[in-house]
Amino acid sequence: MSPRRTNQTPPSLHWLCPRERTPPGLAPERGREWRHVTGTVAGTGLANAAAAFDNYTKSKNGRRKGARMGTPRFKSKRKARLACRFTTGSIRVADDRHVTLPVLGTIRTHESTVKLVARVQSGMARILSATVRHERGRWFVSFQTEVKREITPVARPGVAVGIDLGVKVLAVMADSAGQIRYVDNPKHYEGEHKRLRRLSRRASRRQGPAVHDRATGKTIRREPSKRWVKANAERNRVHHRVANLREDALHKLTTAVRAEYGTVVVEDLNVAGMLRNRRLARKIADAGFAEIRRQLTYKGQRNACPTVVASRWYPSSKTCSSCKTVKAKLPLHVRVFSCDACGLVIDRDENAARNLADLASASTTGTEVAGDRGTPSVPKPRGADQKTRASRASRKADPVRAGGAKPPHRRKEPRDLQQDTTAQLGLW
């Protein structure tokens, strides 16, 4: 049965729609409380809730890409990031060091806003909204603007580059002109891992804001000690420094690539699946594979340069970059590619980068995903090429033999013959 329609305002929304039914005793308190808060705060929360339900409905109906989304849940005030969006009111950039926001007034900024001021005053930009958020121990304000941007020509518009990402070497770039470049992995988190372990042990020995009761299985909230607050702040400073260094390094890498090459070819990596590997998860997260692809994509749109995404099942590491023959198997520990057909001996990552660069001239689909171009290949030892792991049949599906005898034991497939996702991507 569908719920009965009514024109009455729900009780939980009475504070948004003040009417005569509101108790008179609550009006003065509400008035004093909301004098210091702009009305766009409540509107932003409702807009975010509407967007969450819309995304959930589209994901359930199969109209939204990505992982399946669940039902929207309430945010926790202890875990949610502090943020507020201003869409109306006095939102402007006063000068190169001050911004004006509703209710908050004029605030001095740590970074210079001279570029935004010049664009606004010249009529090349228009401010739409402002978002204030607390992140990494600091307060940030970001402006959503409409900008008239001129296309900046790249240095080599007719050259395509293939980028093979990895852990030992962050990126191997091979362009269509025959030039090979290696970008070392800075490993910011690995450099601070020993220090973070020491600081985490120090914080765990002090009274934190919560404790787990093993008898009842519940989490008990309590007031943290001052020593824990001090230790936790010191640990967070290291985490924030690592995140800032990683962000700066990735922006410099992607900006340099997009300023030089006209076409960039990257792989469609299953980063969420690779993070389930407990041996590589920390190193993969430290490298930032998904962030590199995201930055290359939107920075290429600024320069009107295409970004070709290779298919997830394209054998870039197993394909010979010279004769295009696909090997039957190539274990992850084999770091040198040797072709049995033409005798080419080359580094594994360099061979994959060259194959990715060749995909720039191949035909692409409407989704800019390039696949295999029908190159000759050696018959595979397995029939299922597009499988990330060997699946074993259910016991219920096993045939029942006469007399209740169990079916013969299935021999486990050797590791070299298994289609491992990490082995296909060439992480080492």
Image: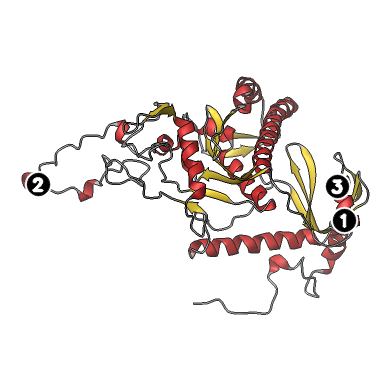
Tell me: residue 51, above or below residue 321.
below
Q: Earlier in the sequence, mark 3 or mark 2?
A: 3
Total numbered labels? 3
Residue matched to label 3: 115
- Residue at 77% from the left image edge and 74% from the top image edge: 21
- Is label 1 in contact with label 3 (beta carbons under 8 Å)? no
In x, y percent, where is residue 397? Answer: 21, 50
* 10 Å crowding of disc 1: few (<14), some (14-19), many (20+): some
* 10 Å crowding of disc 3: few (<14), some (14-19), many (20+): few
Residue matched to label 1: 120
In the image, what residue type sits under mark 1?
Answer: Val
* 10 Å crowding of disc 2: few (<14), some (14-19), many (20+): few
Q: Is residue 191 left or right of residue 326?
A: right
What's the distance in space between the residues labelled 1 and 3, CA to CA? 9 Å
Which element is circle 3 on?
helix
Residue matched to label 2: 401
Q: Earlier in the sequence, mark 2 or mark 1?
A: 1
In the image, what residue type sits under mark 2?
Answer: Arg
In x, y percent, where is residue 298? Answer: 65, 50
- Is label 2 in contact with label 1 (beta carbons under 8 Å)? no
Instruction: Specify whether residue 366 is in view.
Output: yes
Q: Is residue 228 left or right of residue 330?
A: right
Tell me: residue 397, above or below residue 176.
below
Which element is circle 2 on?
loop
Q: Quadrant of residue 182?
A: top right
In the image, what residue type sits under mark 3?
Answer: Lys
- Is label 3 in contact with label 2 (beta carbons under 8 Å)? no
Per the rendering, the mark at residue 367 is none
